[in-house]
Image (cartoon, rainbow, N blue to C red):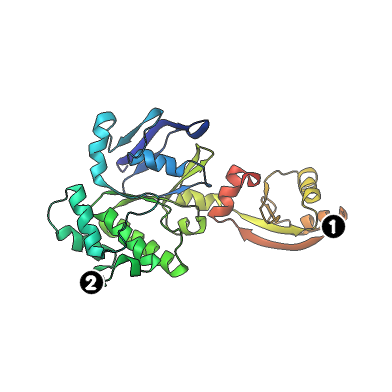
Amino acid sequence: MKEIIFETFNLTKKYSNTLALDEVSMSIRQGEIYGFIGENGAGKTTLIRLLTGLAMPDSGEMALWGKRGKLLNEQRSRMGCIVESPSVYMNMTAYQNLEIQRQQRGIPGKACIDKALGMVNLLDTGKKKAKDFSLGMRQRLALSIALLGNPEFLILDEPINGLDPAGIIELRNLLKQLNREKGITILISSHILTELHQLATNYGIMHKGRLVQQITASELEEHCKQHLLLQVNDVAAATRVIETELHTNNYIVMPDKSIRLYDCNDHSGRVSSLLNENGIILYQMAQGGDDLEAYYTKLIGGDDI
């Protein structure tokens, strides 16, 4: 089994009367791309701030490469991170931005600058200033700053925000390459679940400050079962029929008021007949399968989204 890179033990953090993290225990192993999932306010950024030393927990512990307490901070030199707004000087070139970061972090030699820029395909930007970069290029510049010093563990908080589809694909492919070719372990927080589904090998699902579930990509695929997708005129009446006459609670009402009905994939005719007998108009019935967004919605309860 691969080495545990990062681990928390009942980690708790409060801000005034808000419990941002509620006894979170989680682990990330070497080589994983760990997708950190949760709605705004779920606690993702709070945990990342604790991990990177930008805040301190009220109780509980963290470990990096098995080191805790006073030994934790020296292990942070093995990490690279983008937390909240990337620190990019807009009136400087990519090279100048990295040179300032290199000096501030005490990294010897300048060879690391070209190496980091090469890893994100920004070596040919020359004298072009960051203010003239596209948003995707700025994100790659921020990533190159995080890659200075050859980090073993990369922490990215909402790196996809604001990117157009081409920029998202570009960043996704780059992260996969860094993970595959450089062996970099990645923790990536995002609320764009469809994108994480194409990237992550493991997931941590947060909700209201608690870690609801840790799951591998293969386990997720097993959970994302086939279902009947129903569009009806009366959702409440339809769910009553499902529960009382089909004798199942294995369904979910999605935010668009569609119903995803599990366990009845081979009985679509019976479902249609029962709805019709109870005066419910069935606009659409189709076979479908969950994606990460639907699984997350089902796990935490659609009404809370």
Left or right of residue 97, residue 230 in this image: right
Q: What element carries label 1?
A: helix
Q: What is the x, y in percent for residue 209? A: 50, 37
Q: What is the x, y in percent for residue 114? A: 19, 63
- Residue type of the residue flagged with mark 1: Asn
Q: Quadrant of residue 270?
A: bottom right
The answer to the question of whether label 2 and label 1 lie on touching residues, with beta carbons closer than 8 A, is: no
Left or right of residue 108, residue 64 in this image: right
Considering the image in quadrants, where does the N terminus appear?
top left
Q: What element carries label 2?
A: loop
**How many neighbours does mark 1 have within 10 angstroms: few (below 14), some (14-19), or many (20 or more)?**
few
Nearer the observer, 134 or 30: 134
Which residue is the site of mark 1? 276
Point out the tag, 2 or 1, that comes first from the N-terminus.
Answer: 2
Residue beneath the point at 43% across and 70% down: 166
Query: Would residue 271 be visible to someone looking at this image?
Result: yes
Query: Would residue 183 be visible to someone looking at this image?
Result: no
Q: How far apart are marks 2 and 1 (CA)?
A: 68 Å
Q: How many labels does the image show?
A: 2
**How many neighbours does mark 2 have within 10 angstroms: few (below 14), some (14-19), or many (20 or more)?**
few
Q: Which disc, if any, is residue 126? A: 2
193 over 120 or under it: above or below: above
